[in-house]
Image (cartoon, grey):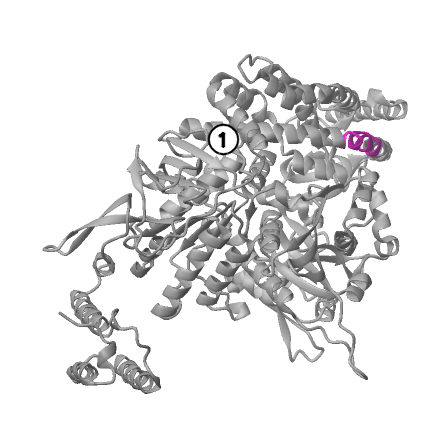
Amino acid sequence: MTDERDGGIVQTFLSLGTDSSQCLRLFSRGNNPGCYVLGWWATFAAKEYIKSTAVLKQWSTTASGSSAVDVVVVNDALCKEMIRDCLLRRGASVEFYERESAGGPYVCRQRGSPGNITDFEASLFEFEEAEIQLLASGSLVFGARQDTGVLVGFTALNTTLRLLSYTEYVDTPQLTSLDALVAQTNLKELLLTVTLPPAAAGGQPVLEEDDRIIAVRRICERCGVQLKVSTLREVRQQMKSEAAAKGLGALAEILRVPEERLTLDLCPLASHAVENILGRIDAMDVANQHAFYLRRIVPSTYMKLDSAAIEALNLVSKKPEPRGSLPTSVFSWLNRCHTGMGSRAMRQWLLQPLRSAEDINQRLNMVELFVESPVLRDMLVAQVLRRCGDMDRLNRRLQRRSLALKDTQAFLNFVNVVPAALQVLGTYTGSQSKLLKDEFIAPMEEINEHMANLKTLIEVTVDFSDRNAARMNSSFDDELQELHEQLTSTQKEIDREYAHVLRKYDWNEKQLKYEYHSTYGYVFRVSRKEDRQLRSSKELITVSTSKDGVRFVSEKMASLSEQYRRINDDYETRQQDLKRKLIDSIASYLPVLDDAKELIATLDVYVAWALVVKDSPRPMVRPAVRDTRATAAAPVVKKEEGSAGGALAAGALKTSGGAGPVLSFKNLRHPLVELRQPNFKANSLFLTEQANGLLITGPNMGGKSTFMRSVGVAVVLAQAGCFVPADAAEVQVRDAVMCRVGATDHLAQGVSTFMVEMLESAAILSGATQDTLAIVDELGRGTSTYDGFGLAWAIAQDVVVRVRATLLFSTHFHELTQLPLQCAAIQNAHFGADVDEAAGTLRFSYSLQPGPCGRSYGLYVAALANMPETVIARAKAKAAEWETFEKEGIRSGSSNNAPDATVVRAVSAYAKRLRELEQQAPSETRDAAVQRLKLEVLQNALVQPYLAEVS
């Protein structure tokens, strides 16, 4: 690397404090392309991006040269890639530094963080990623504790959409609603503002983390959100002085409708949250004045989907999915949108399904319209959607006044799209004509009136005749017209001078060229072989010599070049003045452009979902969606001698009870698995309000988890307004889908896998209602068998009896299949398998059948994994041995006498000896000791009355 050490960069880098992987600092190279990267990030960039440490150089950090820092130069394309990865993937901040003046100190010109990408939006939007629009930062304030939970004030700021959302509500102790808000608003940063407790006598107040702060930390870790806990005083000090001085008064300047701020009076806690985040908005910036929308989030409007449910159902992917590969998330499967704004709207719809049956059915009507109208759908794609630019990006640049003159052509194209959409939609004459007119045609007609004026403005003022550049139309302004005429006249004089030199010095047009040089202005150029006349002439002045020839000027050409430069500078100055006025005029149409963008994006989503239905390899059906009933019958609790009801009727697994279905699916399929397995086995489900639970058993890999996930995905799709992959579907609106699926841990918080299970289960028990769909997969695996079984039994029973939520519960605890004997709200079902005992092989049926699974298939699944035969044989022997020992140790069911303390101590001693034997390595000695222990237990007179008879 040839770059010399820049002491100013080193001094600035060292003054910024600790070098950290949490902040990428880029330093400008002045007039040279690319940036300098120092320290940890220099080494990381060399290894991970450039793939070579040979590009690294070391700059000394002391005068003696005793210490040094790694430095690397990254080009502009790599800078953009690193910025994107930091802000969107790695959760790191980015800072860009350049000199304030020639030879001056380096100052930070741009600063971005995962939740605040304003300064880097231009670079990020080049990648056309749907997620960018959704990035937001949040503010959280806790109120006084209440008997029913925790009072919460929450705000989310999306600078790209210019949207400030807020809500105030009472949450559960586990903050389940906050978890859903963080996931659904796609927060990347969260500021939690707390109040310090009173200081002890003579001491300083100390911030102590209570259970609420701990719960917020766990939520942020699970969602990949950077959390900052600050006191109210610290927040006020960090705010920009203008915003801090005005407080909520700054809303009057930044809101597009200032009166909207009055609604905050009803939410005092949310008002504090809004005030704490206003420091991220410069109210004095003209681009931010009257540019933001204020919206109140009503939790009851959307289905609650927390991070656990979003991850368990694979709704969206945390990492970019390679193009051309099979989709790994429901979003990528559904995303057939033709515009970036449509993709972003679809992602939001998927994460925020509706809870109003009327609104859901309206969406379904639109999807059905485009499914049944292929000509209308194809015309919209060809004449409207493919002609749209990314209006999220363009509107944001317009709002920031950073729009290039050439970008106005994109606005002109979008303006022309609106009447094209009206013309296409006007061709529809089907049964949904009124809905189409009310939702799209009527609003677009009103928008089109304003768009006509915008179209005229752009066409009159901007000249697009040059494909390489756009200019202000000179005929639009008298001064610009005069300067344009002077430029044209000067250009003609330059042409005449060129012809004069050609004739005088006997060059032809192939030998002598004239061109505009960025440094010398208009010059002549000849090759080195043709410069004989130039060397002999005293009238021609050489200005430069290079490989491509010799550049020179005549006295008149130099004068004309200077004249052209002066006029052109005046022309550009005037053009920039007119451009600023034009951009301000176009910006006044932002509300109309935003409305038009939302309508086109919504059309894009409907068309995309219709394309998914059309191209599905197997039928997708419109679900019948209805609101929840005001009252529901309580579940019946049976006595132990009862039996679990359940029968297969018309291909659907039905529960007992005469109420209408809560969930009903016929031949339901999982869309992602079906893409990979065309012969995917479909299954059916029928649950009612009185019998609303299913206890599913069966072998590993038998289809339990896939079936439960397919039900969860189908409910989300239905309430988002999309068709579902089934032959028939009926859904009673669910207020939440809550999941306890998979085995993960949170090492950063010191939370084990089992603790994660318990936290998610506690969230279900405290946050679920009778309108919730709860999916629990193999609960209780992270502890002892008896503790796990007890917890699984109690949790499943509590969900269906007390909470009365709809429950899908899979388990390998076969003893749990006795639960339906006590509770009619839940019934047994299983996925079976066929075993070839002679060959020792297993074949899954993948078919959901009534009743419990009759046996365990763990050893056969282990054999499918190519486990060594010796290990399988040993496992079978030990399983048989311990199963016999367990039966011999069961207390007699006919004995009603409770054991006294002596018996308890004896049994405890036997248990201790048994555990010690379990910890020993397998050997004949250990096996003999086990047999002696069994014989001793059987012969113990104190324990013998409590043992069952063994046949």
Mark 1, residues whose alpha carbon is within 10 Å: few (<14), some, or many (≥20)?
many
| Res 785 quadrant in image | bottom left
Between 904 and 811, the residue placed more toward the observer is 904
Q: Name which residue type carries label 1.
A: Trp
Is residue 885 depicted above or below 438 in this figure?
below
Between 318 and 195, the residue placed more toward the observer is 195
- Give the position of the C terminus as an image quadrant: bottom left
Q: Is residue 651 visible?
A: yes
Q: Is residue 537 visible?
A: no
- Give the position of the N terminus as an image quadrant: bottom right
Q: Is residue 586 magenta?
A: yes
Q: Please provide percent x and percent y for residue 682.
A: 32, 38
Is residue 448 depicted above or below 157 in this figure?
above
- Judged from the image, the secondary structure of the residue bearing numbered disc 1 is helix
| Residue drawn 53% across the image and 18% down it | 379
| Residue drawn 75% across the image and 31% down it | 591
State the residue position of label 1. 609
Q: Please provide percent x and percent y for residue 76.
A: 62, 50
Is residue 826 depicted above or below 42 in this figure?
above
Q: Please provide percent x and percent y for residue 569.
A: 84, 35
Q: Report whether 675 appears left or right of 188.
A: left
Q: Please provide percent x and percent y for residue 153.
A: 71, 54
Question: Please, which residue is most extreme toward the left here?
Answer: 838
Between 906 and 130, the residue placed more toward the observer is 906
Q: Report whether 249 appears left or right of 775.
A: right
Q: Which residues are magenta?
A: 580-590
Q: Report whether 809 appears left or right of 275.
A: left
The rendered magenta stretch, by its main secondary structure, is classed as: helix
Q: Is residue 320 magenta?
A: no
